[in-house]
Every structure is written in C-alpha cells, then in structure tokens.
Amino acid sequence: MNKESGGLSKADRELIVVATSAHNHCLYCVVSHSALHRIYSKKPVLADEVAVNYRVAELSAREKAMLDFALTVCRGETVTEEHFSTLEAHGFDREDIWDIAAIAAFFALSNRMAHLTDMRPNAEFYNMGRVPRDTENASDGRVKDE
C-alpha cells in the first residue's frame, strides 16, 4: 500500500480501500483508511463522500474510473477488455490495473477479518487529516501531519 511506483498515488490507493471497505461494511477500514486518504490527499471531505456513495462524490473522471473498476473486482463481477480500455483511456497501464484489482481483492479479505475480530477504529482516526496538529502542544511528541 505504501508503494509510490506506478500510476497510483498513496491517496489513490487509500481511496480504493475506502470505497471497497464501504461496500463491504467494514467500519474499521473505512475510518482508518479515510484518515490516511485525508493526510495524503489534503482533501478533508472526499473520503467521507466516497464512503457514503462514491458515484456522487466530487471525483475526477480518472478517480471514478478507478473506483468503478475496484468495485467491479470487489463485487466479484466479470472483468472484460472494456474495463481495461476504459482504465487505459484514463492513463492507467496494466500494472496499475493489477494494483487496483489487488488492493480491492486484498481488502475483501482484510474487511472480513476485521469483522471476525470485531475491530473498532481508534478515536484518533476520526480527526486525522481534519484537525491540524500542533507539535508544540502535542502531548505525544508526534510531528504534525503534512
């Protein structure tokens, strides 16, 4: 997930996790990966929009194509050459497409394991990337999110 090579940014990767985890009703992954998306993208509300309904979120055409494909994989639908053509028209190459599918597939498992173990998000995740951190006043000594 932390990989920066290829055509997917860290924010793209986290957005895929948010959309697919929302489809799978995984509260832990939606909340924690929304926090990471906010930090990487500097967009404080986009992950929330995606978690509720990515189809009406303020996404670029590229992001919408990426999430349409990720949800196709998440739902276990047949992937066709048309899916590849659509993604390639938005600048994704075959390695990027593999990564989108791999993230969607991996988090299908991860979401179910989070359900099994009844994982709950840490309270801190809800504010991460929304509320600026003041390193001078932070009691935990962490640096502020940038």
Image (cartoon, grey):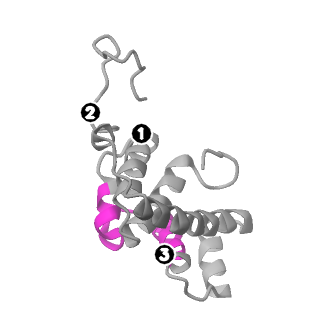
Foreground pick, 105 / 83? 105
Check residue 71 in the rendering and tell me which mark sits there, or answer none: 3
Q: Is residue 56 magenta?
A: yes
Q: Residue furthest front?
A: 117
Q: Which residue is mark 2?
A: 131
The dominant secondary structure in magenta is helix
Residue at disc 1, secondary structure: helix
**Residue 63: x %, y % from top left:** 48, 64
Position of residue 6 measured from the top left corner of the image (x, y, whole percent):
69, 53
The magenta span reads: 48-71
Picture quadrant where residue 133 is located: top left
- What kind of element bears circle 2? loop
Residue drawn at point x = 45 percent, y = 69 percent: 64
What amino acid type is highlighted by mark number 3?
Answer: Leu
The residue sitting at 68% across, 86% down in the picture is 81
Q: Position of residue 35 (x, y in %)?
A: 38, 45
- The disc, 1 or 2, on the residue closer to the chain's N-terminal end is 1
In this rendering, the answer to whether 122 lies above or below 24 is: above
Is any part of residue 60 visible from this angle?
no
The answer to which of 61 and 21 lies nearer the viewer is 21
